């Protein structure tokens, strides 16, 4: 709907509650940081988006197996932000890492693999 400030406020409130209720490296915290990063990316606030997505990835690296598809999602989100910033080599590296994980985690004809190839 384009109501980014409302979305951001809701996601930030959700994150604050999760920080109280959950352990510090719970995957649900990573999901909140990812959502916040997506809003900042849509708002064109790329440094904030990147920071949120990188925090999400840090948590996921601790909480999840190394080839979990959520890690691929984070690398994809980071790649999208770098692309929007015009940092194409960093975007490519992130999208290639996303593809590596998804090749392991998903069946060979999964649509998320097609999305990775498209982003690359």
Image (spheres, rainbow, N blue to C red):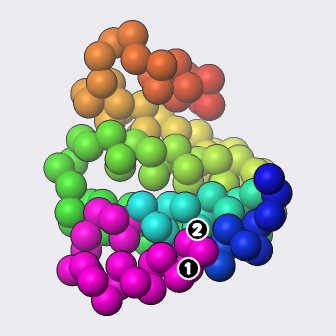
Residue at left 53%, top 82%? Answer: 13
In terms of image quadrants, where is residue 8?
A: bottom right
Crowd around label 2: few <14 · some 14–19 · many ≥20 (10 Å):
many
From mark 2 to mark 1, how far is it between C-alphas? 7 Å
User: On screen, 42 above or below 109?
Assistant: below
In terms of image quadrants, where is residue 115?
A: top right
Crowd around label 1: few <14 · some 14–19 · many ≥20 (10 Å):
some
Q: Main secondary structure of the magenta part?
A: helix
User: On screen, 9 above or below 108?
Assistant: below
User: Can residue 86 be spotted in the picture?
Assistant: yes
Whichever of callouts 2 and 1 sits on the residue coming sooner in the sequence is 1
Q: Which quarter shows the C terminus?
A: top right
Drawn side of residue 9 relative to residue 110, left or right: right
User: Can residue 50 be spotted in the picture?
Assistant: no
Residue at left 48%, top 76%? Answer: 14
Drawn side of residue 100 relative to residue 68, left or right: right
Which x, y percent locates residue 73?
45, 45
Residue at left 66%, top 54%? Answer: 82
Element on which disc 1 rests = helix
Which x, y percent locates residue 97?
41, 40
Q: Which residues are magenta?
A: 10-30
User: On screen, 43 above or below 74?
Assistant: below
Residue ranking furthest to the bottom: 20
For residue 27: magenta?
A: yes
Number of marks drawn = 2
Element on which disc 2 rests = helix
Query: Does the CB distance between marks 2 and 1 fall below 8 Å?
Result: yes
The residue to which callout 1 is attached is 12
Residue at left 62%, top 31%? Answer: 119
For residue 105: magenta?
A: no
The residue to which callout 2 is attached is 36
């Amino acid at each position: 709907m384009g109501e980014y400030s409302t979305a951001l406020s809701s996601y930030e409130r959700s994150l604050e509650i999760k920080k109280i209720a959950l352990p510090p490296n719970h995957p649900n915290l990573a999901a909140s940081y990812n959502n916040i990063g997506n809003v900042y990316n849509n708002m064109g606030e790329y440094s904030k988006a990147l920071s949120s997505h990188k925090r999400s990835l840090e948590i996921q690296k601790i909480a999840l197996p190394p080839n979990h598809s959520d890690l691929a999602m984070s690398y994809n989100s980071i790649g999208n932000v770098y692309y929007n910033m015009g940092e194409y080599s960093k975007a490519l590296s992130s999208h290639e890492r996303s593809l590596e994980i998804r090749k392991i985690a998903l069946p060979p004809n999964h649509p998320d693999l097609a999305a990775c190839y498209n982003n690359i």
